[in-house]
Amino acid sequence: MNAIPHATRDAVRVAAVAKHHTAGEHRVAALDGASLTVRAGTLTAVMGPSGSGKSTLLHCAAGLDRPDAGTVTVDGVDLGSLGERGLTEFRRRRIGFVFQDYNLVDALTAAQNTLLPARLAGARAGRRHALAALEEVGLRDRADHRPHQLSGGEQQRVAIARAVLSRPAVLCADEPTGALDLARGRQVLDRLRAVVDVHGGTVLMVTHDPAVAARADRVVFMADGRIVDELGADGAAPAAEAVAVRMAGLEAV
Ligand SMILES: Nc1ncnc2c1ncn2[C@@H]1O[C@H](COP(=O)(O)OP(=O)(O)OP(=O)(O)O)[C@@H](O)[C@H]1O
């Protein structure tokens, strides 16, 4: 097989993407020519002032929103070339989500939720695989609990177990630690790091917290619907202080 090493492949390519939202008579340019390339096997954090377009960028990269202009390519597939059904299937098979409100199916147990994307994709994964993935996120003993019986952080970890099992091309995380206390937030981040460092996965994460962003390999900064700056591109780990200074600069504008 001509496998390309993970670190040299692009998992996500967002090129000159524009996206407008309409609220009443207002038309807001949430993205205005945003471009971002995410290498496979890396953890990238997206930061920026409130309203700068972070969530919209993540939604476009995850195939949940369609851009008005520009292209989004995930794992070599131009999402714009897919119809609704094709896009839904691609999302199920190739994109993982750690979102506050887009995570788990209430009617299913943690183990069943962990298996869901793999099963939908036709993989022959069974309970044994689900338990192994849940073990990795420290939740093997909660395998038969349903989402409402789990805390927010535990639900996030089930969503990560899912990614461990189904190996999406990219795992998109929107404020994965936002609702968690420090210790639980750290656990979730440790697991996201393991998705990258142990399993060779790719994570794209939106966060407001410089300390969280400092766990990424690269931090990109948004303002007015575009990527305007970044840290870590030279291979040096971004420091929380440097991230905070850049953010303060953007928020002061
Ligand atoms: N569904 C929507 N309808 C109308 N406007 C929207 C919608 N979603 C986002 N916007 C607007 O688009 C712009 C970008 O929003 P987005 O949520 O992407 O920013 P963000 O950087 O993630 O913000 P925050 O940090 O506050 O979550 C904002 O001005 C926002 O008000």
Image (cartoon, grey):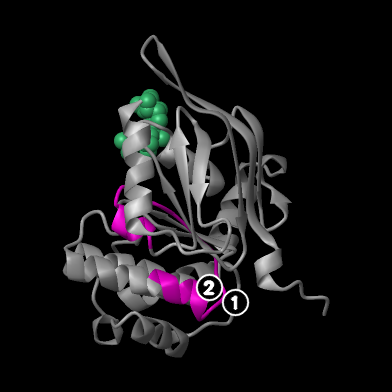
> Is residue 188 shown left or right of residue 195?
left
SS class, disc 2: helix
Viewer-nearest residue: 245 or 43? 245
Residue holding disc 1: 123
The verdict on residue 223 being magenta is: no
Amino acid on which disc 1 is placed: Ala
Relative image position of residue 162 (x, y in whole percent): 44, 71
Relative image position of residue 208 (x, y in whole percent): 31, 47
Q: Residues within 10 Å of mark 1 (few under 14, many from 20)?
A: few
Q: Does any portion of residue 226 appear in the rendered image?
A: yes
Relative image position of residue 169 (x, y in whole percent): 59, 63
Assign the C terminus to one quadrant of the image.
top left
List the single residue furthest toward the right. 2
Amino acid on which disc 2 is placed: Ser
Question: Which residue is depicted at the point 58% across and 68% down?
Answer: 41
Callout in the foreground (2, 1): 2
Viewer-nearest residue: 162 or 36? 36
Position of residue 74 relative to residue 226, above or below, is: below
Q: Which residues are magenta?
A: 192-214
User: Quick one: label 2 or label 1, which is nearer the N terminus?
Assistant: 1
Relative image position of residue 79 (x, y in whole percent): 66, 45
Checking the image for residue 166, the label placed there is 2
